[in-house]
Image: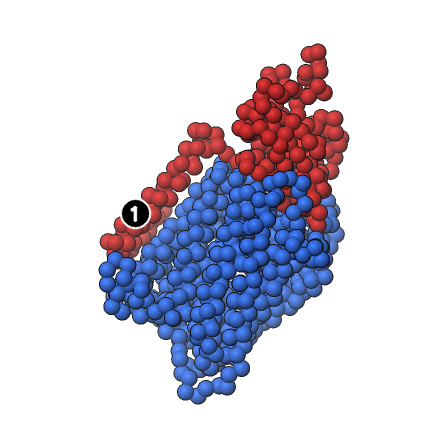
Amino acid sequence: MNDAAEKKLALSHFWVAFAAFILACFMGEYQVLERSGFIPALDSAPVYFASVSTHGVLMAFVLTTFFIMGFGYTVAAASLKQPVWNKPLAWLGFWVALVGVVLAAIPLLAGKASVLYTFYPPIVAHAAFYIGATLLVVGSWAWCAIMLMTFNQWKKTNPGQAVPLAMFATAMNALLWLWTSAGVALEVLFQLIPFSLGWIDTIDPGLARTLFAWTLHPIVYFWLIPAYTAFYVFVPKQAGGFLFSDEMARIAFIVLAVFALPIGFHHLYMDPEQAQGWKLLHGIGTFVVALPTLVTGFTVIASLEIAGRLRGGKGLFGWILTLPWDNTMVLSVILSLLMLIFGGFGGIVNASYAMNAMIHNTAWVPGHFHLIFGGTTIIMYFAIAYYLWPILAGKPLFSKPMALTQLWLWFIGMVILTTPWHILGLLGQPRRISSVVYNNLLTLAWKPYELAMIFGGLVLLGSACLFIYNLVKTQLNPVSEDFAETIEFAGTHHAPAPMPEYLNSLGLWNKVIAVLMAISFGFPILQFFFMKTFGSSAWGY
Amino acid sequence: MQTEPSKSINYIKDLCTQFNAIHIDPLERKWIAISLMIVGLFVGIITIDALFHGINPPSKVETIDSASLHLSEEFAEDNLGVQVDDKGAITIRMVAGRYSFFPKHIDVPAETPLTFRWVSMDVLHGVHIPMTNMSTMIVPGYVAEITTTFPKPGDYPLLCNEYCGLGHNHMWSNISVIAKEDWHAPTKSQVKGEQQ
């Protein structure tokens, strides 16, 4: 099969993703420096908040969405061995999303959209920011349609056969993203855009926050699923073994997608506009969604153990030493799991309904999501990039030792950055402050941790530069005729039995999601139309 | 009428047979059981605390017009701060606005239940007192109510913890927690005034 068109499509998406990433890394290091106050010349709240807003949008929306789209096209073509459905639509989606990014970037960089990537009405940004963000999401909906159509086409032409796990996970992610993005789309289309254009005078921030909470948790799983997909379909093969269980992997993806959605109120635990019963319900759901992660941890480690023992590892832990630590995918998964253990622990604290009061909106929270997103998830994006880039470009990777160094540096930098960040939160430092001006002795205890964070950020920035340098040099390599690597998916440990239909299609799970969403968000959204509420007028910043 | 339920029962039966047909390794079964127990333990503790010990985050769904707080009886300037009602219950009414919390400084007793009622006069704010569990979002249009007790006397800062504009980091004020026996209700407290 000639998949040159899919390869070009995927590489274009990846380049946008990582261009956004490197720009945002420089901003991140500037932000820790500015916030620490060690360089008085840098001190500027307007520049700081323009930077924080741009950093958030680039990392959370641009890097992720473009990377996931490119990854989806690659997985679909390689695992199904058939062309991706409707490539003109794919390119249209790419360009719509890219125009959206540029449209949003102009007010962001000009300081006209310093509302952070979470929007925070009734503060308003320039309308171009909201319209640009909407176009980015609309572009990604084209990707969702293509993934679901390709999935269904393959099932029609291959009746009774199990959809390859990689494609099952990717299609599940497309379905998840359609549901996820609906919440923020409602907020932006019916509240923020009309508000920023002056078509409506007031909006209800309580309703806006509820709609944003709809999106805010499952979006994290949208970002995470490509990393988990790599755990299941690439890692076992790269480590020299087999996937422990294909069925459990599917169950994990299903539970992730289904339970990621109806639980967003753990972001609203401290909010006055939702009642405690709904918060408790969402809180319990939040713990349920920890289950697929626990199962994933087991399956991935079991798969690694099979590989380690096949490579001659003996004893209870001896197999760890015989793993190929010099394989970028294997090294990444080990470091990713380590960060997941610590990040997961922090996540349980956040999820704990009452204990959350201790750390809510403190520095602990950005510490947590940098560890679990910037660490666990992004290190797998690196691993996927190192694995796919040579295959997509048809050229060998420029330097493997440099890639391994880069991955270690990312891990070390992330530990140095996020450990003090968590501690600052426990010491009471609020998040999102541009400098520390509180006239209080407590702030003296914060200084050493802020210093450590600058150093951690510097290590991360160095690592990010090595990553981009390696990819650029790979891209600039001459096309090698004898380079013929292809994507290899892991085989399974157990002979695959006939796959039950519920583990091979999305229809049932779509209905389950609809029911759960109606239960958990139906009344909490409708209440704003039943009770007497008072809108807020627009504010600058 | 009768076909509907039996249809769905058959559907569920079919799902169960399908579920039992898939291969799950015995070791994996054990791990799933352990995972369920861990999650069950956390959920159990949280639910029991919420239902029987009343440990809940601030969740009183009460609306207010943030644009006209000065005209409201409760949050007019004279009524802000610490008040004691005739049963001795202490309520503290606070207004958050860019960039401070009003009143700027209050005295409260230690080891006494305190009910804070927070409102915003402009945008979204959040407030916490470090080293305590006094933390809530302050959303314009809503009253955030939280009851807590401070065990240790001392001077604490009140910090805004939600981005509210370029001056966000300048938004803070002070609270003094005074030993219970040394604390006196403020003289302008309405109810007390009537009694005198």
Residue A219 at what x, y percent from top left? Answer: 51, 56
Residue located 34% across and 69% down the image: A324
Residue located 59% across and 37% down the image: B129
Q: Quadrant of residue A483?
A: bottom left
Residue A432 at what x, y percent from top left? Answer: 62, 50
Q: Nearer the viewer, residue B177 or B98?
A: B177
Other residues around mark 1 within 10 Å, as few (<14) / some (14–19) / many (≥20): few
Q: Nearer the viewer, residue A3 or B48?
A: B48
In the figure, the shade used to draw chain A is blue
Q: Nearer the viewer, residue A238 or A523?
A: A238
Q: Is residue B115 visible?
A: no
Q: Residue lying farthest bottom?
A: A481
Q: Is residue A421 visible?
A: yes
Q: Quadrant of residue A58?
A: bottom right
Q: Disc 1: which chain?
A: B
- Please tell me whether residue B130 is drawn above or below residue B82 in the rendered image: below
Residue located 37% across and 74% down the image: A488
In the figure, the shade used to draw chain B is red
In the picture, which quadrant includes the N terminus of chain A? bottom left
Residue indicated by mark 1: B33
Residue located 55% across and 42% down the image: A427
- Dot 1: what SS? helix
Q: Amino acid at mark 1?
A: Ala
